[in-house]
Image (spheres, coloured by chain):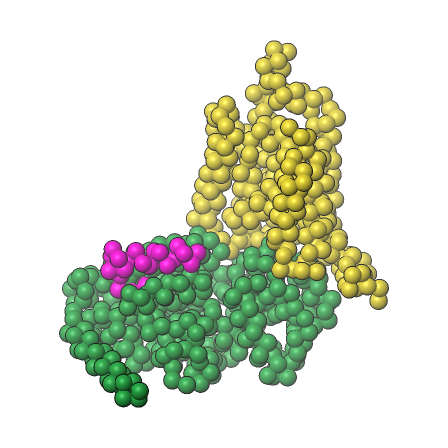
Amino acid sequence: MTFIKKSLTTAVALAATATMATTAQAEISDGEIRIGYLADMSGTYRDLAGPGGLEALNMAVEDMGGSINGAPIQVFSADDRNSADVGANTVREWFDTRNVDLVSGLVASSVSIAATRVIEENNGLGIVSGSAASSITNEHCTPNHIHWVYDTYPLANGTAKAIVDQGGDSWFMLTADYAFGHALEGDVTRVVEDNGGEIVGGVRHPFPTDDFSSYILQAQGSGAKIIGLANAGADTVNAINTAAQFGVVQSGQQLAGLLVFLNDVYAMGLETTQGLLLTTGWYWNMDDESREWAERYYERVGRMPTMVQAGIYSSTMHYLQTVAELGTDDPVAVRAALGERPINDFFSRNGRVREDGRMVHDMFLAQVKSPEDSEHEWDLYEILATIPAEEAFRPLSESQCKLVQN
Amino acid sequence: MTMIFGVPAAVFLGQLLLGLINGAFYALLSLGLAVIFGLLKIVNFAHGAMYMLGAFATLLGMRYLGINYWAALLLAPLVVGLFGMLLERFMLRRIAHLDHLYGLLLTFGLALIFEGSLVNFFGVSGARYPTPELLQGGFQLGFMFLPKYRAFVLAAAIVVCVFTWFMIERTRLGAYLRAGTENPALMQAFGVNVPLLITLTYGFGVALAAFAGVLAAPLYPVSPNMGSNLLIVVFAVVVIGGMGSILGAVITGLAMGLIEGLTKVYYPEAANTVIFLVMILVLLLRPAGLFGKEA
C-alpha cells in the first residue's frame, strides 16, 4: 500500500516538474496579457471598488507602458451584480472565449468564492481585492488565487482588541444574517472573549436592512458598553445613522464598526461618525507615498481611493512586474514568483504572499476624526497604531487550507 | 419589571411605536400606489423611483439652490409630481388601452433608467441630509428615547393620508375622479375633461411618493437605490390591503409596520419576510385583499 502511495506521489511530482519545465519556456500567451476585471459596478458595493477600481487597474497598466516585451495589455470588465452565478459564468466565459490571464477585482465574498473555483478549474490566476471573508484563503483556498487587501480576521483582531483594551468589555452584536456577518461575528466573539470581555447579546438582522431603529433600541436596552456592527456597506451606514438619531453615544454607549470603508465615512459625514474606531489595510493620507498615488487617482476619478481601489492598483502592478521579469504570463509560474517576491509599495508594508494565497501586510487601526480636526473633505482618519503583518492575519498554524501542511 | 411575552414592557412599547412610524411610511407609499392603481389601473413600478427622486430633489435643492427642508416639503412633491404628469401625458397614455402588463413594464423600465442614471452621477453610498434644526433632539418617554423627527414623520404621514382619503372619498372632485375612471365616455359626455383628470391623478400619486421621499431624506442615506428596496414591500402592503383600496392601503400600511416591528423583537431573522408571509395568507384566504371588493 505504502509502495503504491509512494510511487503515485513520485509520478505526480514528476508530472508537475515536467509541466513547470515547459511553462517556464512559454512566452506570453496569444501575444497579449489579458486582464478581466469583475466587480459590482452598480449595486451596494459599487463605491468601494466598482468603476474606481477599474480606473486604478488602468492606471497600473498605463504606468507599465501599456505593454510588456511588445505584448499589449488588454483590460476588459464586467458587472457581477453581486451574484455568485453571474460572476462564475462571466469568468468561465472569459476562460473559454478570451483566454483571460488574470481575473482581478472580485468584491462580494460569495462571488469571489464561486469565481475562484472556476479559476482553479481552468488553472488560471485570480487576485481577490474587495472581499472580506477570511475563508477565501482558508477552507476555500486554491493554488490559483491570492487575497490581497484585508479580511475579517484582522478586522476583528484590530478593532475589537483595541476596544476591549480601552475598557469596552461588554458587547452587543448587530450581525448581518449571512455568511460574511456570521464569520465576522465569530471572529469578534473570539477576540473579545480572549481578551477578557463578554458578549451580552445580539441580533441577526436580515441583509440588507434599511431601518435599524428597532435593533438599536434593543441594543440600548441591553446595557452593553459597545455595540459591534458585524455588517458592511449600506447596513453599517444605516445602523450608524440610526444610532446617532437615537442618541446612542450621548447615553454612554460606543459603536464599533468592524468593516467600514472610506466611502462609508465620507457618505455619513464626520458629525455622525467621529470617534469611530476601525481597521483598514491602507489610508490615502497615511504618508507621502500614499498621498502621491492618491492625488493621481483623485485627478482621474474625483474621489479619494478606498483601500480596495489602492489594492487593485498594487496587485495589478505586482502581477505585471512579475510577468515582465519572467517573460511569461503562465499562471503557475507567475503565482510561484509572486510567492517569493517581497510585496512592498505605497499600499503594502512588509507584505508577502503566503502559500494559502493570503497576502499578509501591515494593517492599521484608525479613528475617524472630529469635524474640528478635519482639514478638508477627505481628511477623515487618524492612524492610531500599526498591526504588524505577521500578527494581523490568521496564522498558518490555524489554517484549514488544503495547501497548508498542518 | 413588567414583562410582555418575555420582553420587558418598556422595550415592547418602544418597538410598537417604532413599528407604527415605519408603518406610516408604508401607508404613505402604498396610498400613492393604491390611488394610481385604483383609479387609473396602472401598476406603477416607478413608484419607488419617484420616492427616490423626491429625496434627491430635497437633497439637491438644499445643496445647489439653498432650499430648506420646510420649503422642500412642498416644492419637491410639486416638481416630481409635474414630472410624473409629463410621463403620464407622453408615455403612459399611449399604452393606456393595452393590457396592464405593458404599463408595468414601461414604469419598471423607467425606474431602472432613473436609478441607473443617478448611480452614474452619485454612486450608491448615498448622501446624508441633515435633520431640520427645529426637529433635532428628542423626547425621553420613559420607556424609550423618541427622536423628535420620527414623531413628526408619524404625524405628517397621518395628516396626509387622512387628507387624501377625504379628497377622494368625500369631495365632489373625488367623485368626478371615481366616476371618470369607472366610465370615461359618460363623464366626457357630461363635459368633464377626463384625460386631464387622469394626468392630475397620476401626478398626485407620484407627489405622494415624493412627499414620502422628503420625509425619508433625514432618516436614511439619500441614494439612487433607496426606492427599489422599499417598493416590493409596499407592493405587498397594497396587495394585502386590496389593490386599489385607499383606506385599505393606509390601515394595512400601519398594521404591517406594527407586525414587522414585533417580528424584529421576537425573531429578527424573519423581519424582511414576515410581510410576504402575511401576503400569502391573505391571498389564500381573501384573494381580493383585506379591504378589496371581490371582482
Magenta region: A83-104
Question: Is residue B134 rendered magenta in the image?
Answer: no
Quarter residue A135 falls in: bottom left
Which chain is represented by green in the image? A
Q: Give whichever of A75, A97 is nearer the camera.
A: A97
**Residue B159 place in picture, x, y as percent:** 74, 39
Image point (65%, 80%), residue name:
A197
Classify B269 as above or below A334: above
Residue lying at the far bottom of the rendered structure? A2
Classify B48 as above or below A117: above
- Where the C terminus of chain A falls, by quadrant? bottom left
- Where the N terminus of chain A falls, by quadrant? bottom left
Q: Is residue A89 left or right of residue A152?
A: left
Q: Give whichever of B184, A404 is nearer the camera.
A: A404
Image point (44%, 56%), residue name:
A83
Count of picture labels: 0
Residue lying at the far right of the rendered structure? B2
**Residue A103 place in picture, x, y as percent:** 32, 63
Image point (36%, 66%), residue name:
A117
Kindly tell me whether residue B86 is visible in this rendering: no
**Residue A303 place in picture, x, y as percent:** 43, 58
Quarter residue A36 falls in: bottom left
Q: Is residue A254 left or right of residue A17?
A: right
Q: Give whichever of A35, B267 is nearer the camera.
A: B267
Q: Is residue A166 left or right of residue B156?
A: left
Which color was chain B given?
yellow
Quarter residue A146 falls in: bottom left
Q: Is residue B202 left or right of residue A85?
A: right
Kindly tell me whether residue A318 is visible in this rendering: yes
Image point (19%, 70%), residue name:
A328
Magenta residues, dominant SS class = helix
**Residue B180 place in picture, x, y as percent:** 63, 20
